[in-house]
Image (cartoon, rainbow, N blue to C red):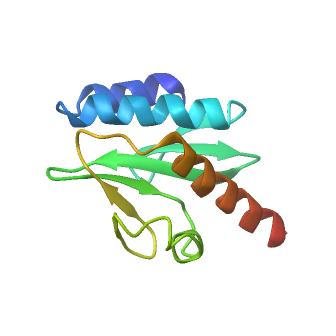
Amino acid sequence: MTSKQVLAHLSKVPQPQKATLLELRKTILEIIPEAEEVISYGFPGYRINGKIICGFDAFKNHCSFFPHSSLVIPELEKELVNYKTSKGALQFAIDKPLPKSLVRKLIRTRMRILAETK
């Protein structure tokens, strides 16, 4: 799976979700440039050393960020009070990308949890 497949997936996403997710993609790649872009569980994901770090996708009324760990969202609950969350997903507006600082915290938390479980 390659960036071409991620871009192909995003090409099918309607606006404004597409622009929002393209911005999120750019942010993720700035934070973890070493990540391999893949399609995982049918949506774009980012893998390092064989482990999925995060992913995202668009839905009709929201976009979602997936930290690929049920431990990340509860750990950051104070920072996520303005978002709808579940154990494995963070929902955000279709026309407003997640702040870079929040994406950085989500990714760092996921990577720390992965390191601790080795």
Point out residue 1 in the picture as x, y percentages from the top left corner.
54, 33
Residue 80 falls left or right of residue 111: left
Residue 97 quadrant: top left
Residue 86 quadrant: bottom left
Q: Quadrant of the C terminus?
A: bottom right
| Number of marks in the rendered image | 0
Point out residue 89 in the picture as x, y percentages from the top left corner.
41, 65
Residue 70 quadrant: bottom right
70 above or below 1? below
Q: Residue at x 77, y 47 (%)?
A: 49
Q: Residue at x 62, y 30 (%)?
A: 30
Point out residue 111 in the picture as x, y percentages from the top left corner.
72, 57
Point out residue 110 in the picture as x, y percentages from the top left corner.
65, 61
Q: Residue at x 56, y 45 (%)?
A: 101
Q: Residue at x 67, y 37 (%)?
A: 32
Going by the picture, which residue comes out furthest to the top? Answer: 4
28 above or below 93? above
Frontmost residue, 42 versus 73: 73
Residue 55 falls left or right of residue 108: left
115 above or below 29? below
116 above or below 54? below
